[in-house]
Image (tube, grey):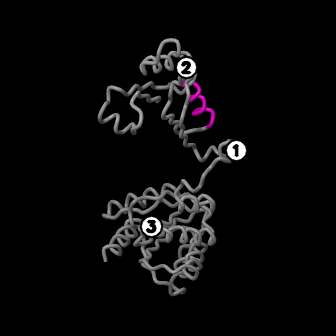
Amino acid sequence: MVVASTEGGMSVEEISKEKPETIIRSKIEVAVGMQNFQARELAFGLGIEPDLIRRASDTIIGCYKAFSELDATMVEVNPLVISKQKQILALDCKMSFDNNAMFRRSQVSELRDKTQEDSKEIFASDRGLNYVSLDGNIGNIINGAGLAMASMDMIKLAGGAPANFLDVGGGATPEKIVKAFKLVTMDEKVKVILVNIFAGINRCDWVAEGIVDALKKIEIKVPLVIRLAGTNVEKGNKILKESKINYIEANTLEDAANKAVAALNK
């Protein structure tokens, strides 16, 4: 979708609320890409004088090519101006990109400014963890994206709110578990930590060793709920119990979510 407006100096959300009639939209068919007639329609819709329509449409097509050829998720030019010399100039542009495509876009990844990103998400990506910061206060350490999503749903169903999405992956080694604990404890909003591991390729005893190791290195000042299931679950639970660490044991996903919310409410 290409969205254009003659109303500059304000966010598109404000424009759509206060002056919706000034917003022009053009839907792009992915299979064929943006067509020249669509760019010209946008240029005419912006009230650009006829002798500059071609230049303006070339500029719009150029923005679309940058979007599609550089694996961008957004291209925002604001403002786009006409100079006294009748040039079409982008005075400012912001672009965001698909992080999963940056391995083939070295010219883009070299421009990455980590100071503009969430410090916890940077910490995670540099250590091979899949992490998204959220607004809740129950921190999650989970293996597998599907289980992580289900766990967050269960937390909401139990009356809580997840502080993050954190997938340590199928090969959750003890080292990764330690890194995950460091990451979750970086978030000051976290009041309870929920560890939910279903071991298939992974092993519960490895995860348990990682948890014990993490608690030796990191002081956990909030309640910790742990649920292990799958491969070597008996060994994993035995390691946790013999370590004498302070935690709340859970047996099912629902049980883990309920106990995490109960610990939070205490």
Q: Distance between the Cα atoms at labels 1 and 2?
A: 34 Å
Which residue appears at 37% of the width and 61% of the height?
A: 154
> Magenta residues, as a range?
60-70
Proximity of marks 1 and 3: CB atoms separated by less than 8 Å: no
* Mark 1 lies on residue: 106
Mark 3 lies on a secondary structure that is strand
Question: Looking at the rendered structure, which numbered label has been put on residue 124?
Answer: none
* Mark 2 lies on residue: 86
Q: Distance between the Cα atoms at labels 1 and 3?
A: 34 Å
Q: Is residue 260 visible?
A: yes
Q: Main secondary structure of the magenta part?
A: helix
Against 226, is 95 above or below? above
Describe residue 262's horizontal placement relative to residue 75 as left or right. Answer: left
Q: Is residue 170 magenta?
A: no
x then y, percent, for residue 88: 55, 24
Q: Is residue 33 visible?
A: no
Quarter of the picture holding the C terminus: bottom left
Q: Is residue 68 magenta?
A: yes
x then y, percent, for residue 249: 43, 77
Q: Nearer the viewer, mark 3 or mark 2?
A: 2
x then y, percent, for residue 66: 60, 32
* Mark 3 lies on residue: 139
Closer to the camera in the image, 100 or 92: 92
Against 94, is 58 above or below? above
Question: Which amino acid lies under the numbered mark 2 shown in the image of this protein?
Answer: Lys
Question: Which amino acid lies under the numbered mark 1 shown in the image of this protein?
Answer: Ser
Closer to the camera in the image, 165 or 86: 86
Which residue appears at 51% of the width and 34% of the height?
A: 77
View extreme (front): residue: 84
Question: Which amino acid lies under the numbered mark 3 shown in the image of this protein?
Answer: Gly
